Image (spheres, rainbow, N blue to C red):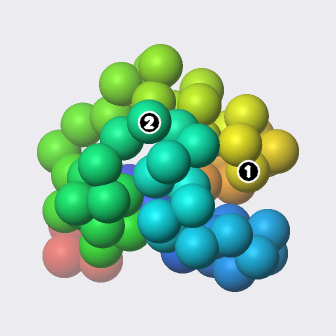
Amino acid sequence: MIIVNLDVMLARRKISSGELSAKVGISPANISILKTGKAKAIRFSTLNALCEVLDCQPGDILEFRKDPQE
């Protein structure tokens, strides 16, 4: 399963969800969907913008973990 660590990066960079939303150009609702891990997909352009604003790598935001139920 893919884990979204967006909240961790926001805390590290001391940026609010609202500020990130404005800088990336996506709605606060979509930021919330990403933070809670409810997103089914993410566009590369969005991931690129997140990495640019947060000054990080995609692997800092997205993490793979083996599903314990498998």
Q: Secondary structure at mark 1?
A: helix
Whether residue 50 sits left or right of residue 1 in the image: it is: right
Whether residue 36 sits left or right of residue 39 in the image: it is: right
Tell me where residue 16 sits by quadrant.
bottom right
Q: Residue 25: which disc?
A: 2
Q: Nearer the viewer, residue 37 or 51?
A: 51
Q: Residue 54: which disc?
A: 1
Residue 66 in view (yes/no): no
| N-term-proximal mark, 2 vs 1 | 2
* Residue sitting at x 60%, y 26%: 48
Q: Nearer the viewer, residue 2 or 20?
A: 20
* Residue sitting at x 38%, y 68%: 35
Whole-percent x, y for residue 18 in the image: 47, 65
Outermost residue, top direction? 45
Residue 13 in view (yes/no): yes
Q: Tell me: residue 2, above or below residue 46.
A: below
Q: Amino acid at mark 1?
A: Leu
* Residue sitting at x 58%, y 43%: 23
Whole-percent x, y for residue 13 in the image: 79, 68
Q: Secondary structure at mark 2?
A: loop
Image quarter of the N terminus: bottom left
**Of labels 2 and 1, the one closer to you:** 2
Tell me where residue 15 sits by quadrant.
bottom right
Q: Tell me: residue 47, above or below residue 7.
A: above
Callouts 2 and 1 close, C-beta under 8 Å: no
Q: Amino acid at mark 2?
A: Gly
Whether residue 70 sits left or right of residue 22 in the image: it is: left
Q: Nearer the viewer, residue 43 or 2?
A: 43
